Image: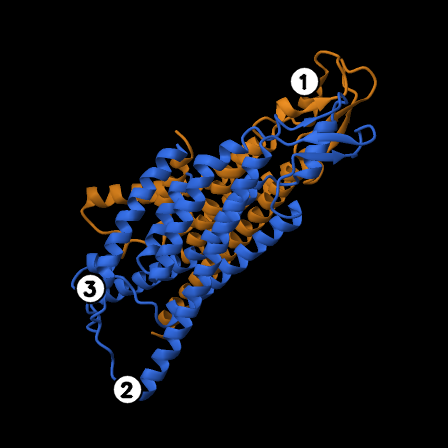
């Protein structure tokens, strides 16, 4: 169980997402999770061992480290990624529930059911309409909230996004004020800024997706008001091709993430 | 043999769960197992090395660490995850047993897969009660062993061979406390989900039984 398993869970949601949603998922896996696993964990790996204080007083280093790093950057990012991925599970559950209902109808032999077999129900891609639209939109809203909360928590806890080289500590049992030195401050600053930048891009993508969904919703409503006939689905073939391309990309990402995380 | 086994076990049990049961599995996977593996394990990785006592007396640090951490938080957390997932095995064994019987008798014993009724319902209810029981036992154990869910920065140790009272410092106490609070919150959420699933199933099948008897009486 690791990030690869999360990818499997979210990969299923990918089929039912909009194009912007698919780009968001790719950015999440390549520029955030993969960077976290492959690079950031190594940079922060030795953070407490190489945190050095200019004192021989036992316990001073522990206390100062705890004072300046109540929760490590790397753990905060891991939590942020987990929370930000979770709303997609709502969509996955909704889709699973709809599939379950269709299978039930099919088994009862309902004549309204237009599927030939259960495999077709399993493979079917649901359009983002009706109650699924509300679930999907709420999931994007929650994603935005979680991203913003974590970014604020980061800024608040670490007083900006810079990692200083030197910290002055006077927590007990340190005698007077003691100089403590952080290991690899520049590298940590670079990665912090990178992760914040990618978070901001993800926020923009989510905002764009939200606007797109709202625009589509209002346009559909106004079209229904003008022309109540059902629109033909000739967009489906192009969307299927896009789905296949995205699945190819996400499969190769999954192999890389699993390879690196193991 | 690793956490992947637990994941497969829970995925197998998922097929025979109710909707609430599936939410429970998702919460356990994402908020407990994944958080444990990607974040919590690394915080407690060097807890013994980073535990520092203000003394040069050999053996004092070992004895103090053992006195204050009889079982490490992270091991208790792992045990809790395993014990809480284990009752799902009852459901899987029951289904495997029934499928075996079906094969021998060439007869379908369940109306449809995924529908919980009869003996499977009893097994499922017992597994829910066991899950709630294990969750509560582990939360109480955490509370008793560590005097609440706090992780102090400093502990005062006067166990032999430490001379007098010695100050010992725990590493990353704030981060450990944050993750312990997270563990307690997700445990309570899982208890709430299990209790609501239990009530839902008992209520649903009582109504069903009552209606059947009522219809029979009228006939």
How crowded pointer 3 is (Cα within 10 Å; few <14, some 14-19, many 20+) is rated as few
How crowded pointer 1 is (Cα within 10 Å; few <14, some 14-19, many 20+) is rated as some
Residue at 54% over, 60% down: A145
Q: CA distance from mark 3 to mark 1?
A: 67 Å
Front-most of B92 and A76? A76
Q: Which chain is orange?
A: B
Front-most of B160 and A132? A132
Q: CA distance from mark 3 to mark 2?
A: 24 Å
Q: Is residue A131 visible?
A: yes
Element carrying mark 3: helix
Which of the chains bears the disc numbered 2? Answer: A
Q: Furthest-top residue in view?
A: B58
Q: CA distance from mark 2 to mark 1?
A: 79 Å
Q: Which chain is blue?
A: A
Mark carried by residue A237? 3
The correct choice, above or below, for A225 with respect to B168 in the image is below
Quick one: quadrant of the C terminus of chain A?
Answer: top left
Residue at 37% over, 60% down: A20
Quick one: quadrant of the N terminus of chain A?
Answer: top left
Mark carried by residue B62? 1
Front-most of A188 and B34? A188
Q: Is residue B13 visible?
A: no
Residue bearing the label numbered 2: A227
Element carrying mark 2: loop
Residue at 35% over, 42% down: B92
* Same-chain status of marks 3 and 1: no
| Earlier sequence position, callout 3 versus callout 2 | 2
């Amino acid at each position: 169980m690791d990030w690869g398993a999360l990818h499997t869970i979210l990969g299923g949601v990918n089929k039912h997402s909009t194009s912007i949603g698919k780009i968001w998922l790719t950015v999440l896996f390549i520029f955030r999770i993969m960077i976290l696993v492959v690079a950031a964990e190594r940079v922060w790996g030795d953070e407490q061992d190489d945190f050095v204080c200019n004192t021989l007083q036992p316990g001073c280093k522990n206390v100062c480290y705890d004072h300046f790093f109540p929760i490590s950057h790397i753990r905060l990012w891991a939590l942020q990624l987990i929370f930000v991925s979770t709303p997609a599970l709502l969509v996955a559950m909704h889709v699973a529930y709809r599939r379950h209902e269709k299978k039930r109808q099919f088994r009862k032999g309902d004549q309204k059911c237009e599927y030939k077999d259960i495999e077709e129900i399993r493979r079917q891609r649901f359009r983002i309409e009706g109650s699924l639209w509300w679930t999907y939109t709420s999931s994007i809203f929650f994603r935005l909230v979680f991203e913003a909360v974590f970014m604020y928590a980061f800024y608040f806890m670490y007083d900006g996004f810079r990692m200083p080289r030197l910290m002055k500590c006077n927590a007990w049992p340190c005698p007077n004020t003691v100089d403590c030195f952080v290991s690899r401050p520049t590298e940590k600053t670079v990665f912090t800024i990178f992760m914040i930048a990618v978070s901001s891009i993800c926020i923009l993508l989510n905002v764009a997706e939200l606007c797109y969904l709202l625009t589509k919703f209002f346009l559909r409503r106004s079209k229904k008001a003008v022309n109540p006939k059902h629109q033909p689905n000739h967009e489906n073939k192009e969307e299927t091709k896009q789905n296949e391309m995205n699945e190819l990309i996400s499969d190769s990402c999954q192999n890389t993430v699993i390879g690196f995380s193991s | 043999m690793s956490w992947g086994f637990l994941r497969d076990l829970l995925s197998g049990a998922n097929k025979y769960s109710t909707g609430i049961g599936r939410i429970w599995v998702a919460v356990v996977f994402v908020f407990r197992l994944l958080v444990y593996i990607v974040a919590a394990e690394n915080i407690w990785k060097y807890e013994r090395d980073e535990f520092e006592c203000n003394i040069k007396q050999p053996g004092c640090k070992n004895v103090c660490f053992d006195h204050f951490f009889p079982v490490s938080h992270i091991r208790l957390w792992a045990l809790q995850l395993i014990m809480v997932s284990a009752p799902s095995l009852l459901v899987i064994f029951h289904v495997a047993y029934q499928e075996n019987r079906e094969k021998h008798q060439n007869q379908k014993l369940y109306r449809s897969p995924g529908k919980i009724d009869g003996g499977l319902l009893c097994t499922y209810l017992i597994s829910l009660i066991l899950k709630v029981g294990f969750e509560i036992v582990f939360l109480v154990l955490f509370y008793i062993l560590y005097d609440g869910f706090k992780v102090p920065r400093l502990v005062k140790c006067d166990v032999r061979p430490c001379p007098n009272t010695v100050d010992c410092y725990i590493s990353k106490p704030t981060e450990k406390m944050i993750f312990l609070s997270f563990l307690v919150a997700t445990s309570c959420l899982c208890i709430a989900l299990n209790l609501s699933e239990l009530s839902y199933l008992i209520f649903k099948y009582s109504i069903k039984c009552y209606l059947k008897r009522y219809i029979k009486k009228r006939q």
